[in-house]
Image (cartoon, helix red, strand yellow):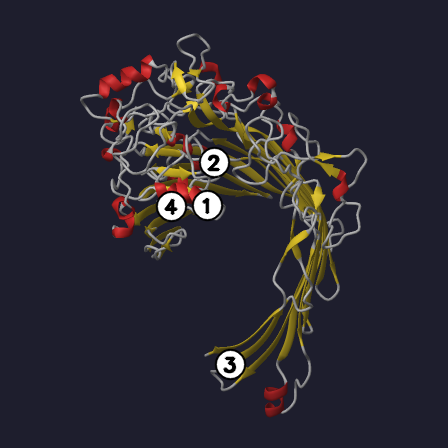
């Protein structure tokens, strides 16, 4: 709805998106039918006011709501007793959204039967206020504005997860059986046979699902001036300030690990049995912190703490327990450090050196800060003490999924018992956290370009673009073992949990803002607009891109020296040439109507993409050669002076494989990340069109389209694992030539 007056314009918009269709069954078991709904709605109000010909104000308010709710069918395939599983829950039926739902079943060598982490749901709301004032004065155009965004998510679909797999099958609240022959006094030697007998190696389970209402209010101010210094020179300068507070939970129900709070005092530091890896004493939450002086009373009835639902009757006792265990330390709701100094200057210019309008020189640069995202904190809602985890090991008495005949390792009969349904085996607690000093990610960008207009509407442009990323997120395991720890003679036969630097805790994954990136590119393009039936373009980019990790969940290989991660970006291609053209064939134009209709109206077009390859990493065949309890991308060793990319390229041997050997035990290899460049790609697409008219109101277009018309093979995968039988060989290719025909009618 628009209402316009001479000095005032009001625009109202509203939209609603209904639910999307079902995803259908998931996994190979075909047991569960998922029914997701994603209704979304939003509204915008825009008020534009002309106070005078030189003064304009634009105010906008936007509100959106995004709902994600995933249901499961309640048919027989959902039920545990359908599979004959009567193993009781460690945390009790009350901790489950659907008490009778099947567990996840992992059998080594076979696909998993996944119970999935559903049902689940979340509701995200975003409210944005923005006001921009524009003032024209002489040869200046001033702009100033304010921006406020209040957003968050009521999150009830996160559980304890490993970063990078937030929808992993291990998120099943209803338990996971693993049949791999481990932890058993007697085993058939075949995991499938063990599964048929019900002899599990490990049974794991999660407690009450947490419900975390995340929220943050972000603010920004800016001012800029566009100054037309002369008719041939324009300069733009501006300054922006932003305040990006970390997201926090209104109910203070999340936690993170702080090394400064970890105590090594006897009785507080956990003790771990070196033979079993189980925790035998100490404070299980040593070093873990939750925000706020105490949980707010409006949190009652929404989540559990220490495996107990928070109620009005246990509210004081639970808060006392949080204080006594050192979890509540009076931290602010956000836990992380706030920053008030995010000033971002920007400067740019455009210059016509000859005053003819055919040549321009442009340049500019600026600093850009990136605000925090929900993904930075969501997983912390799945940490202890709000969502607990437990494991039952098969042990000397042979764990059985069939109860009540099973005997647990502790000698207790099935079902497991304990205080509040506590864990039958106390294991180190894994924690997902963040960078408590939380340096804000920043990007520094600059560019310089030269443009010139040639005859026949042909534009040539040459430019340079540079980007530097600072304080980017890289996941690091703060509990990673020092290099070579597992390989020391005195540590043979000792469980890894007994070797961790922070005893009693498991993996301590923290997204630290310590990574950097760099991008430099030369860009050249030629573009010709449609002139006498011909249009064409060519664009070439030569670039170098380096980073510490090329995806959101990148992991530090060596926590103690993250420079080990630095290398070419996984997706980087140094050379890219793209050509495109459209040519309207001139034949039979101006002929009589019948000839023109039958034989005229043809045009051809095409796109060609020629690209060099992406880089690949040479990894050890035997995983954790460094002995640090992690095999994230551990590299092989490259011989000194040997260039693996200086080789006769072939499908059988793409690079010089003799350059690499496995890293010696107790060391990180020196081959480096992304040290081998893969095969490039050459793709030519071609199309032939016939445009015609049947009647005055009915037009048609015949299309013949040829994808990869020259049928060039484009290889896309190399075997890079040392010890693989096909090491160094090409083992994947893109699609061959495809041809399709079509007719389009317009009326």
Q: Secondary structure at mark 2?
A: loop
Report crowding for label 1: few under 14, some 14 to 19, many 20 or more residues within 10 A (C-alpha). Answer: some
Q: Is residue 273 left or right of residue 69?
A: right
Locate residue 454: give its quadrant.
bottom right
Disc 4: which residue: 114
List the residue tagged with mark 3.
Answer: 699
Q: Disc 2 or 1, which lies upstream in sequence?
A: 1
Q: Secondary structure at mark 4?
A: loop
Q: CA distance from mark 4 to mark 2?
A: 19 Å
Nearer-the-camera pick, 465 or 191: 191
Residue at the extreme left of the image, as rendered:
313
Disc 3 element? strand
In which quadrant of the rendered image does the C terminus lie? bottom left
Whole-angstrom CA distance, mark 1 to mark 4, is: 58 Å
Q: CA distance from mark 1 to mark 3?
A: 46 Å
Say which residue appears at 48% left-offset and 82% top-offset.
Answer: 698
Q: Which residue is mark 2?
A: 163
**Mark 4 Cα within 10 Å, few/some/many (few <14, many 20+)?**
many
Q: Earlier in the sequence, mark 2 or mark 3?
A: 2
Q: Of the residues under marks 1 and 3, which one precedes in the sequence?
A: 1
As drawn, the residue found furthest toward the right would be 641
Q: CA distance from mark 3 to mark 4?
A: 53 Å
Query: Residue 20, located in which quarter of the rendered image?
Result: bottom left
Q: Residues within 10 Å of mark 3 (few under 14, many from 20)?
A: some
Query: Mark 1 sits on what residue?
Result: 56
Labels 1, 4: front one: 4
The relative height of residue 314 versus residue 704 in the rendered view (above or below) is: above
Give the percent coordinates (x, y) of residue 649: 76, 52
Question: Of callouts 3 and 4, which one flags the residue occurring earlier in the amino acid sequence?
Answer: 4
Label 1 sits on a secondary structure element that is strand
Which is nearer the N-term, disc 4 or disc 2? 4
């Amino acid at each position: 709805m628009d209402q316009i007056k001479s000095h005032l314009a009001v625009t109202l918009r509203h939209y609603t998106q209904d639910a999307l269709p079902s995803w259908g069954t998931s996994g190979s078991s075909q047991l569960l039918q998922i029914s997701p709904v994603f209704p979304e709605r939003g509204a915008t109000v825009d008020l534009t006011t002309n106070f005078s010909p030189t003064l304009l104000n634009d105010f906008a308010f936007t509100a959106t709501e995004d709902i994600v709710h995933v249901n499961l069918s309640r048919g027989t395939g959902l039920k545990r007793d359908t599979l004959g599983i009567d193993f009781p829950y460690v945390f009790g039926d009350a901790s489950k959204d659907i008490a009778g739902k099947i567990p996840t079943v992992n059998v080594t060598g076979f696909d998993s039967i996944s119970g999935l982490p559903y049902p689940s749901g979340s509701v995200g709301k975003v409210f944005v206020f923005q006001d921009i004032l524009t003032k024209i004065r002489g040869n200046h155009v001033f702009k100033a504005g304010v921006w406020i965004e209040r957003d968050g998510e009521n999150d009830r679909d996160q559980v304890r997860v490993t970063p990078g797999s937030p929808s992993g099958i291990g998120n099943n609240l209803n338990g996971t059986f693993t049949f791999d022959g481990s932890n058993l006094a007697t085993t058939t030697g075949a995991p499938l046979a063990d599964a048929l007998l019900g002899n599990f190696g490990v049974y794991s389970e999660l407690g009450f699902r947490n419900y975390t209402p995340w929220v943050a209010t972000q603010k920004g101010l800016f001012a800029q001036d566009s100054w037309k210094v002369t008719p041939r020179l324009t300069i733009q300068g501006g300054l922006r300030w932003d305040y990006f507070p970390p997201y926090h939970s209104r109910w203070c129900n999340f936690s993170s690990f702080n090394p400064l709070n970890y105590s090594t005092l006897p009785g507080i530091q956990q003790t771990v049995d070196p033979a079993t890896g189980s925790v035998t004493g100490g404070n299980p939450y040593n070093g873990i912190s939750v925000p706020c002086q105490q949980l707010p009373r409006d949190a009652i009835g929404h989540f559990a703490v220490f495996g107990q639902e928070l109620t009005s009757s246990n509210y004081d006792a639970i808060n006392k327990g949080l204080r006594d265990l050192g979890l509540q330390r009076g931290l602010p709701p956000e836990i992380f450090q706030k920053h008030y100094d995010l000033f971002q200057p920007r400067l740019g210019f455009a210059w016509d050196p000859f005053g003819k309008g055919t040549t321009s020189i442009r340049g500019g640069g600026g600093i850009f800060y990136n605000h925090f995202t929900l993904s930075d904190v969501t997983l912390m809602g799945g940490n202890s003490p709000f969502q607990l985890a437990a494991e039952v090991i098969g042990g000397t008495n042979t764990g059985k999924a069939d109860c009540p005949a099973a005997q647990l390792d502790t000698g207790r009969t099935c079902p497991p018992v304990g205080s509040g349904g506590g864990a039958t085996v106390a294991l180190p607690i894994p924690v997902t956290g963040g960078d408590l000093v939380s340096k804000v990610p920043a990007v520094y960008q600059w560019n310089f370009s030269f443009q010139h207009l040639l005859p026949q509407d042909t534009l040539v442009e040459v430019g340079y673009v540079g980007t530097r990323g600072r304080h980017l997120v890289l996941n690091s395991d703060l509990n990673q073992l020092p290099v070579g720890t597992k390989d020391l003679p005195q540590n043979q036969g000792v469980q890894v949990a007994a070797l961790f630097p922070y005893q009693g805790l498991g993996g301590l994954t923290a997204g630290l803002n310590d990574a950097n990136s760099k991008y430099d590119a030369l860009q050249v393009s030629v573009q010709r607009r449609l002139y006498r039936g011909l249009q064409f373009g060519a664009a070439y980019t030569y670039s170098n891109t380096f980073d510490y990790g090329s995806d959101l969940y990148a992991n530090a290989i060596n926590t103690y020296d993250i420079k080990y991660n630095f290398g070419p970006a996984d997706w980087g291609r140094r050379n890219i040439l793209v050509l495109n053209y459209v040519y309207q064939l001139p034949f039979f134009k101006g002929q009589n109507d019948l000839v023109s209709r039958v034989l005229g109206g043809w045009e051809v077009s095409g796109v060609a993409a020629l690209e060099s390859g992406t880089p690949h990493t040479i990894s050890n065949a035997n995983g954790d050669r460094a002995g640090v309890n992690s095999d994230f991308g551990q590299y092989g060793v490259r011989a000194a002076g040997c260039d693996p990319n200086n080789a006769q390229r072939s499908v059988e041997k793409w690079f010089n494989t003799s350059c690499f050997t496995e890293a010696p035990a107790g060391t990180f290899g020196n081959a480096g990340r992304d040290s081998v460049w893969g095969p490039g790609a050459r793709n030519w697409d071609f199309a032939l069109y016939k445009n015609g008219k049947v009647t005055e109101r009915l037009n048609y277009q015949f299309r013949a389209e040829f994808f990869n018309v020259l049928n060039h093979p484009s290889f896309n995968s190399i075997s890079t694992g040392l010890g693989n039988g096909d090491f160094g060989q090409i083992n994947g290719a893109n699609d061959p030539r495809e041809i399709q025909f079509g007719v389009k009618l317009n009326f």
